[in-house]
Image (cartoon, helix red, strand yellow):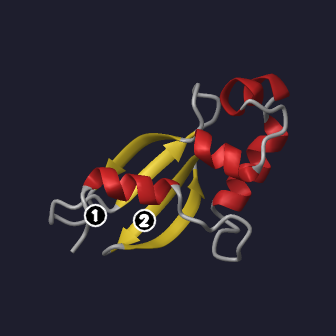
Amino acid sequence: MAGDSKERATRARTAALHGTEAGSYGPTLFDSHHLGALEPVYWLGFCCAEKPTPAQVLSALVLVGSWEAEEDGVVDTYDFSLPGEVTDYLLSVCFEGDTVAEVSMES
């Protein structure tokens, strides 16, 4: 049975796919794109480092939306982005049941 929405959002945020083949079009792409695109002063404000690690970037993400894919009342998809409206990109985490099925970068 699927967990509550808050617990699933926490699991979605920490989906450990960075640096893996499964995460190449998700967290790995999101990090590499934004680390090169944003100024060091931005990162200092949200990650306390001019060149944060991928884990620091992912921990800075904020939940910007979530929704149910089916009418079962369970949130299936969580969208995260960087704070401060500095990007149009999202890191979208989709669940199948209690398992993280996919993490992808969306625009």
List x then y, in percent, for residue 105: 60, 56
Image coords of residue 28 (percent x, y): 72, 60
Name the residue at 65% across, 69% down.
23
Relative horizontal placement of residue 80, taking residue 16 as reference (left or right)? left
| Residue at x-position 60% and y-position 37% | 82
**Vertically, is 24 above or below 50?**
below
Dot 2 falls on a residue whose secondary structure is strand
Q: In front: 103, or 57?
A: 57
Q: Picture quarter containing residue 49?
A: top right
Q: Identify whether 16 is placed above or below 75.
A: below
State which quadrant residue 45 falls in: top right
Q: Is residue 89 visible?
A: no
Mark 1 touching mark 2, by CB under 8 A?
Answer: yes
**Considering only vertical position in the picture, is 3 above or below 22?**
above
Residue identifier under label 1: 69
Amino acid beneath label 1: Ala
Q: Please give the name of the residue rendered at 46% of the width and 58% of the height, measured from the top-left corner.
A: 12
Disc 1 element: loop
Q: Which residue is mark 2?
A: 94
